[in-house]
Image (spheres, helix red, strand yellow):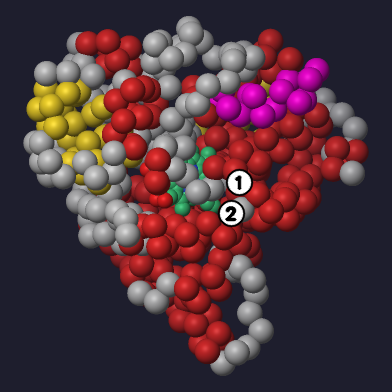
């Protein structure tokens, strides 16, 4: 069987072919993309590669094309320096401070769904506005720029996976100019010792001197902080409604929300895989990967590895918890994982508690980039409503 992430059946269901990769083709070579790339799929190989950043480097980026090192898309010592700066914004204490804001916004969004039309799109009305509003606020982006921001964020990701990224050049330039101008204004305010908000933009403006690195970090936070969490929420609800007995279990026991989010992350990772660049020749399972090659680290396949997860192709929110690869691992492990988990768990719990009578109108539509997995539309039908969400948030 020949596998490629670009095949229509794999785009429609990325799990197609995972067992083939895991069992028969643990080092896959894909010549359909420029540059061609290798794919590692087994849990132990994915884990080893992510931990060995000297061999599997991020110096030339984590996307399918070679890029210049920028911000966190780099190796130590640059990566360590910038990661240490950003970590201040994602401490457990910072998450505790953020939580009431997430609960309040979720409450407003669910209340609107409960009193709005019976048919609605979960992506547009809920899964998109929740994380984008939170991250935009952390980055000091005014509410009126949100829609434009979302567009630019989509463009960034689309350009990474596109056959011809130049079609996005104009939009990308507009996005860069926007970020540069906000950064410049904040730097000027800091220099003038004016009152500035205590947000991520201030942190980066104050601590990151290089303009390109600062911009790359803002960009990564914006894209990382919205598209992926949106996908997590739509994927989790979609999969649970396909398994009504598990959705029912969640309604009866809302404390299952965090287990449901973990199983959704394992089963439907919003980031299917990211790339590394080999710094030396590597021979694995009889295949030699040359120095200087792009290697797709297939988190999604590793999450279906039967040597780690029992019945890996079954969606089961009650399965014993084991570490999945959906946030990566090692020095680049997702910085926003606690925030994504918190937002998605609050979101899922609120839906199950306040509008439990939900059903799928259709499976909606997949987002475009081949290495991401989420839904840009998910039409749902609400059959009846429960008591106000405020009883949950109080
Ligand atoms: C469900 C939601 C999310 C998923 C699935 C996800 C996934 C990932 C993955 C796979 C990586 C790369 C790991 C590696 O290379 O080993 C990553 C890195 C990163 N993520 Fe997330 N992410 C999510 C949410 C967020 C959020 C909410 C933020 C911030 C607000 C964020 C910020 C970052 C940053 C800054 C990095 C780079 C870390 C580094 O290179 O040191 N992510 N994320």
Circles 2, 1 touching at the beta carbon (< 8 Å): yes
Give residue 145's quadrant in the image. Answer: bottom right
Tell me what residue is drawn at x 26 percent, y 27 percent.
Answer: 40
Q: Is mark 1 within 8 Å of ligand 1?
A: yes
Point out the frontmost of discs 2 and 1: 2
Tell me what residue is drawn at x 86 percent, y 37 percent.
Answer: 392
As measured in the structure, the alpha-carbon distance from the residue carrying label 2 to the one carrying label 1 is 8 Å
Label 1 sits on residue: 339
Q: Is mark 2 within 8 Å of ligand 1?
A: yes
Considering depth in this image, is 321 or 273 the residue closer to the camera?
321
Quick one: label 1, few (<14), some, or many (20+) residues within 10 Å?
Answer: many
Q: Position of residue 12 (x, y in %)?
A: 38, 24
Tell me what residue is drawn at x 16 percent, y 45 percent.
Answer: 279
- For the stretch drawn in magenta, the main secondary structure is helix
Q: Which mark is residue 90?
A: 2
Q: Position of residue 221 (x, y in %)?
A: 48, 56
Using the rendered image of the protein, determine whether residue 170 is visible from the camera's viewpoint: yes
Using the rendered image of the protein, determine whether residue 124 is visible from the camera's viewpoint: no
Tell me what residue is drawn at x 52 percent, y 29 percent.
Answer: 265
Q: Which mark is residue 309?
A: none
Q: How many marks?
A: 2
Seen in the image, is 229 located left or right of residue 1? right
Give residue 213's quadrant in the image. Answer: bottom left
Please state the extent of the stretch shown in magenta in the rendering.
250-264
Seen in the image, is 86 located left or right of residue 209? right
């Amino acid at each position: 069987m020949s596998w490629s992430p670009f095949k229509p059946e794999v785009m429609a269901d990325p799990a197609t072919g995972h067992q083939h990769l895991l069992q028969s083709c643990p080092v896959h070579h894909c010549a359909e993309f420029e540059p061609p790339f290798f794919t590692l799929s087994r849990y132990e190989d994915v884990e080893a590669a992510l931990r060995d950043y000297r061999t599997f480097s991020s110096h030339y980026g984590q996307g399918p094309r070679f890029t210049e090192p920028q911000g966190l898309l780099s190796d130590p010592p640059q990566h360590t320096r910038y990661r240490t700066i950003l970590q201040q914004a994602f401490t457990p204490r910072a998450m505790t401070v953020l939580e009431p804001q997430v609960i309040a916004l979720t409450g407003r969004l669910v209340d609107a769904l409960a009193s709005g039309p019976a048919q609605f799109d979960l992506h547009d009305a809920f899964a998109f506005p929740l994380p984008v509003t939170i991250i935009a606020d952390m980055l000091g982006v005014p509410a009126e720029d949100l829609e434009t921001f979302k567009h630019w964020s989509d463009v960034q990701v689309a350009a990474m996976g596109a056959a011809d990224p130049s079609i996005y050049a104009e939009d990308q330039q507009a996005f860069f100019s926007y970020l540069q101008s906000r950064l410049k204004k904040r730097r000027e305010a800091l220099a003038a010792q004016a009152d500035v908000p205590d947000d991520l933009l201030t942190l980066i403006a104050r601590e990151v001197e290089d303009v390109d690195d600062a911009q790359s970090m803002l960009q990564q936070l914006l894209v990382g902080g919205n598209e992926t969490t949106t996908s997590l929420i739509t994927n989790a609800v979609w999969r649970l409604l396909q398994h009504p007995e598990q959705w029912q279990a969640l309604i009866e026991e809302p404390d299952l929300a965090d287990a449901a989010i973990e199983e959704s992350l394992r089963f439907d990772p919003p980031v299917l895989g990211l790339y590394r660049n080999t710094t030396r020749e590597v021979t694995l399972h009889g295949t030699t990967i040359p120095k200087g090659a792009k290697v797709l680290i297939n988190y999604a396949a590793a999450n279906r590895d039967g040597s780690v997860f029992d019945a890996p192709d079954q969606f089961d929110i009650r399965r014993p918890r084991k570490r999945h690869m959906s946030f990566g691992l090692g020095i680049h492990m997702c910085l926003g994982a606690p925030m994504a988990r918190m937002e998605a768990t609050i979101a899922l719990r609120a839906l199950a508690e306040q509008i439990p009578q939900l059903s799928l109108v259709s499976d909606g539509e997949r987002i475009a980039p081949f290495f991401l997995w989420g839904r840009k539309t998910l039409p749902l039908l609400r059959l009846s409503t429960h008591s106000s969400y405020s009883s949950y948030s109080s």
